[in-house]
Amino acid sequence: MTSASREVNPERLLRDALHSLRLIVPFRAAWWGQCSAGLANLPPRNWMHGHINLSASFAQEWNHLAERDEFARDSMRQLDTVVRMSGHDDPWPEVSAFSRLHDLYHVMALTTELSGNGFLFFVSLYRSETSPAFSDNESALFAEFVAHLQHHWRGRVREFLQHTTVPSPDGFGLADAYGDLFYLDKRLGVAIHKAYPNWVGSRLPPELVPALRQIPSAISVAGRGLTLQPCGELVVLSLDGVSGRDVLTPRERSVAMLYSRGHSYKEIARLLTLSPATVRTYLRNAYLQLGVRNKIELGVALQMPATQR
């Protein structure tokens, strides 16, 4: 897994690893990703996921009944512990229906905490009723595997995030050009949900997807600056730290951020769909509001808390 972690993106690393596990712990279907037990006034939900032999709508369906799924809640309460269950019977009819629809008769899951991320990491395996339940030996192998997998997955994520040029990011994410998320931390997730409260699932809200195809770019999300930068086949999303830039409008802040990183007036105009004259106006306002005289001072001021300006 070590050599593979240097060659593939984080999502593919997880998928390939689960296919390898299948050779020693057979399963019909698998689900993995990031979840939360309840935060920011939100019920338990999935934020990022991948799957094998499950429907494309699986995560979104689960998010609508997550608060009633006692097995999932048990796994999120018993961190670093393998939880197993067999059967379709559940006190909540909608949970039983979901289990039957997706043939989730035998279930084995492990949830761990992502230090510094704010979310949880989980892997769930499923077998049909005609297959045997997961054994104690398989449970032990699964626990060792998930611990090893999470370590390499986070290492691969860090390699991608090291490519960001945002000096003081307050939250990170990884997505592809279609908006599918491969990594998300709590601060960015909560900011996106604040801006788009009806957002459900582990794909970015459709309103944000166009920006993924116009990178590098900077947009505003819930009053915060969000910088999007290419990194191989993926896009790094960086939520800017709270700073003295709050004196600027979101559009002024986006123009100033891009200019401070070396983009020309014409490039900024193209990226943000503005005229060069409007870019000059926004920059002039940013210079006046921040009290700076050149591009270097602008970059410093954009990261400086307002109380220090």
Image: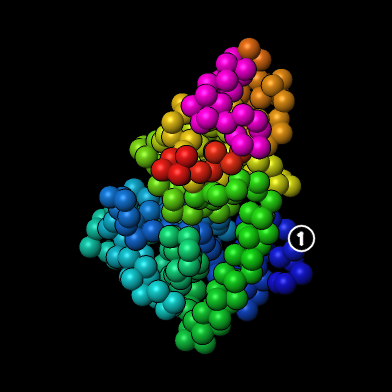
Q: Is 93 rendered above or below residue 202?
A: below
Q: Amino acid at mark 1?
A: Glu
Could one spot residue 60 in this view of the protein? no
Dot 1 lies on which element?
loop
Q: Which residues are magenta?
A: 278-298
Could one spot residue 151 in this view of the protein? yes
Estimate the x, y position of residue 303 in percent, counting from the top left.
54, 43
287 to the left or right of 201: right
Q: Does the magenta-highlighted stretch encompass residue 56?
A: no
Residue identified by numbered label 1: 7
Estimate the x, y position of residue 281 in percent, counting from the top left.
57, 16
Q: Does the magenta-highlighted stretch encompass residue 292?
A: yes
Identify the residue shown where x is 63% and y is 12%.
Answer: 277
Estimate the x, y position of residue 172 in percent, counting from the top left.
54, 50
Furthest residue toward bottom: 137
Crowd tier of the residue under label 1, counting other residues whose Cα lies within 10 Å: few below 14, some 14–19, many 20 or above: few
Identify the residue shown where x is 37% and y is 70%.
Answer: 75
